[in-house]
């Protein structure tokens, strides 16, 4: 029985692309009254979308999703296929273990229809986002990006009421080493990611910050709308940071997973009664 548990764990990790099985991290979209957690599923396109542009990260509010099949949707599609969990896969195991596996799927409602429904919901969500950002590799070199559980690592910054660039999203680093792998962007290929830039009533300038393999990249500046609450970490997030301060980041430095901790920490929480 231990073998079947190990296989189930491996399948959830490797086939889904989400090592924490943390599906729908920020989906469906909900209105919250504080800073949101960033999450950027992606799609690699085997061509340069904007050949007339030499830009690396192109953020234009006029660019809308184009047949966006995100990495998250692809993960659900894989999970809906029976083949990875077919009886042949278990041929060296006892029939009772295969039956236990099938019973697990039924008990947890992890059926093909279940995963198909999540894939459909993700497709509807990602193709209805306010805009898309394109990352284009016009060079002859392969470019690597950290990929955490099927998402690029990035967040949005915006100009606040004092005229300063401040994050309106935070990044949550996974505790699991299996969460991380490299996203490979070959020469003359592009990445499409979606984002929502219409978040409130106040118009301001925004930019997207993307974590590269050894560099923090910034997009060009674009317009969006925010509310004052978008710049504020929720009380729940602040409590989480008191327990594990390195887990949450504003990506002010290269910080690939939980392997290298900034010293001092990027974000320091002061209680109201502290000086």
Image: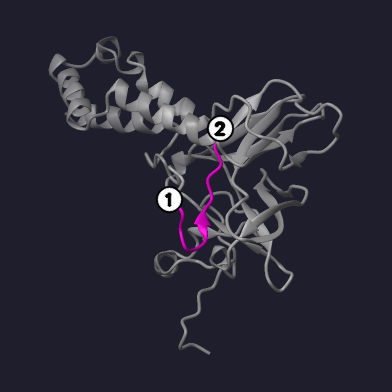
Residue 20, how many percent across, how many down?
39, 42
Q: Earlier in the sequence, mark 1 or mark 2?
A: 2
Residue 71 relative to residue 107: left or right: right
Q: Is residue 266 above or below residue 65?
A: below
Residue bearing the label numbered 2? 127
Residue 95, x across and y down, in percent? 15, 14
Instruction: Indicate the secondary structure of the residue bearing disc 2.
Output: loop
Colour scheme of the rendered structure: one colour
Looking at this view, is 102 or 32 the one in front?
A: 32
| Relative image position of residue 43 (x, y in whole percent) | 60, 29
Q: For the image shown, how many numbered marks are present on the structure?
A: 2
Q: Is residue 21 above or below residue 155?
A: above
Residue at x-position 71% and y-position 25%: 186
- Residue lying at 70% horizontally and 36% vertically, measured from the top left: 63
Find the distance from the CA under tag 1 to the CA under tag 2: 30 Å
121 or 184: nearer the eye? 121
| Extreme-left residue of the structure | 96
Which residue in the protein does label 1 denote? Answer: 175
**Vertical arrangement, residue 253 with respect to residue 211, above or below:** below
Provide the residue span drawn in magenta: 30-41
Residue shown at 85% from the left, 33% from the top: 53
Q: Is residue 222 above or below residue 178?
A: below
Q: Does residue 102 appear left or right of residue 55 in this picture?
A: left
């Amino acid at each position: 029985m231990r073998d079947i548990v190990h296989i189930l764990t491996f399948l959830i990790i490797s086939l889904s692309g989400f090592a924490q099985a943390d599906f729908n991290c920020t989906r469906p979209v909900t209105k919250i009254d504080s800073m949101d957690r960033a999450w950027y599923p992606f799609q690699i396109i085997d061509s340069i979308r904007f050949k007339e542009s030499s830009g690396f990260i192109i953020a234009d509010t006029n660019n809308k999703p184009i047949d966006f099949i995100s990495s998250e949707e692809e993960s659900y599609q894989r999970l809906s296929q029976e083949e990875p969990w077919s009886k042949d896969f278990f041929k060296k195991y006892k029939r009772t273990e295969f039956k236990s596996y099938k019973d697990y799927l039924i008990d947890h409602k992890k059926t093909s229809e279940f995963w198909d429904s999540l894939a459909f919901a993700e497709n509807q969500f990602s193709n209805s986002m306010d805009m898309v950002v394109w990352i284009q590799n016009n060079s002859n070199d392969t470019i690597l990006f950290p990929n955490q559980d099927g998402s690029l690592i990035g967040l949005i910054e915006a100009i606040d009421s004092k005229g300063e660039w401040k994050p309106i999203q935070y990044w949550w680093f996974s505790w699991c080493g299996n969460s991380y792998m490299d996203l490979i962007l070959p020469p003359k290929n592009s990445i499409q990611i979606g984002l929502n830039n219409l978040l409130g009533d106040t118009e301001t300038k925004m930019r997207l910050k993307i974590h590269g393999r050894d560099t923090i990249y910034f997009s060009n500046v674009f317009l969006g709308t925010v509310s004052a609450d978008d710049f504020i970490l929720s009380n729940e997030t602040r409590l989480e940071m008191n327990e594990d301060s390195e887990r949450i980041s504003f990506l002010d430095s290269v910080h690939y997973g939980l392997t290298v901790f900034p010293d001092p920490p990027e974000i320091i929480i002061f209680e109201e009664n502290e000086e």
